Image (cartoon, rainbow, N blue to C red):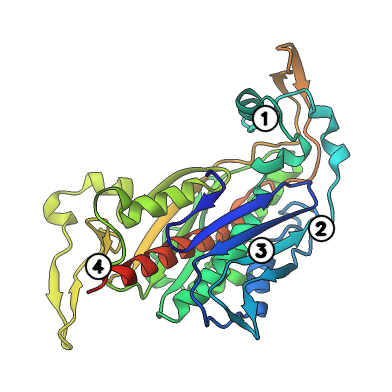
Amino acid sequence: MSSTYGTLFKISTYGESHGAAIGVVIDGCPAGIDFDTNFIQSELDRRKPGQSRITTQRREKDEFQVLSGLFEGKTTGTPISLVIWNEDQRSKDYSHIAQQFRPSHADYTYQQKYGIRDYRGGGRSSARETAARVAAGAIAKLLLQQQGVSIQAYVSQVGKLKLETPYQQLDLARAEENAVRCPDPVMAQEMFDYIDETRKKGDSIGGVVSCVIQGAPVGWGEPVFDKLHAELGKAMLSINAVKGFEYGSGFAGVELFGSEHNDEFYKDETGKVHTKSNHSGGIQGGISNGEDIYFRVAFKPVATIMQDQESVDADGNSVTVSGKGRHDPCVVPRAVPIVEAMAALVLADFYLRNKATQR
């Protein structure tokens, strides 16, 4: 099913952008996990709209309600159902595209595939669906925290503005100190100004979210088709507006010789095996090797812009589509918690799968 993800730690999301609510059902979460309501809400707050003038001005509290799977502050091992009620829909903003196909949106493909589409905010194809993922990802994070695993994403590029500093030299916690979620305050201000200028022109711009996972032990991931990096790639590419994924040295690795790219092993003073470098991005043979896992996710410019664009309507007639509604001029600041959530869901699933097959 296209709305379900995971093998053992499994989620199914539901709802539309302008429907009554969105939500998620989580199946396979172990019993006894402390259900930190404040933490889950704080994760949703990081993704919610209306955070600054460089994000959509739709006003949603994104406060969640637990329907099942919780008793006396702990998970029970039964399906957990969370719902987030929509409160600030303005469906009339989309009435003009009821019979028109917006460029680079899912309008045309949904109509052709299903013969019907919810044009209000994109319906099921809206990025509003990702709030359900963030809620589920927060629970996955709580599970992973018990295993000493941390996940930190940040904005490393907006348009041509690139943060070149390696993540090891950054204080990643500083990413939450500014609206762009870039850990370098100087670059963050440049990015903010650039996004704001783009917004004023009625246009949009893309960017890159980088993510670092620390504390994952050796052995998570499965060979051949369920490689850890393959599942991370699938999870990231399932996020709205994502156009690319690379881990470790990524595309830059093609410029190196094997003698430069190979991660040589050594044993530290405690007897633990490490690699001298980490071009592998913490994954070898599709299985985590105990080093930091790091990857990058590329997001396209938001498809809805406040400019007229040429398109066709449902009858194939040429039309001019006018941009209306409330949209992000750049999606990456709000995408940071979404990237973290999807990474957490992948890792939680592999943790349980590895646990189930351990001798």
Gap in angstroms between the C-alphas marked 3 and 1: 30 Å
The disc label shown at residue 3, or none: none
Q: Earlier in the sequence, mark 4 or mark 1?
A: 1
- The residue at which mark 4 appears reads as 289
Gap in angstroms between the C-alphas marked 4 and 1: 42 Å
Local secondary structure at mark 2: loop
Left or right: 270 in relation to 204 = left
- Taking depth in this image into account, of 165 and 22 the one nearest to the observer is 22
Q: Is residue 257 above or below residue 76?
A: above
Gap in angstroms between the C-alphas marked 3 and 2: 17 Å
The disc label shown at residue 179, or none: 3
- The residue at which mark 2 appears reads as 59
- Taking depth in this image into account, of 77 and 144 the one nearest to the observer is 77
- The residue at which mark 1 appears reads as 107
Q: Residue at left 69%, top 38%? A: 203
* Mark 3 crowd level (few <14, some 14–19, many ≥20, 10 Å Cα): some
Q: Nearer the viewer, mark 3 or mark 2?
A: 2
Residue type for callout 3: Ala
Q: Earlier in the sequence, mark 4 or mark 2?
A: 2
* Mark 4 crowd level (few <14, some 14–19, many ≥20, 10 Å Cα): many
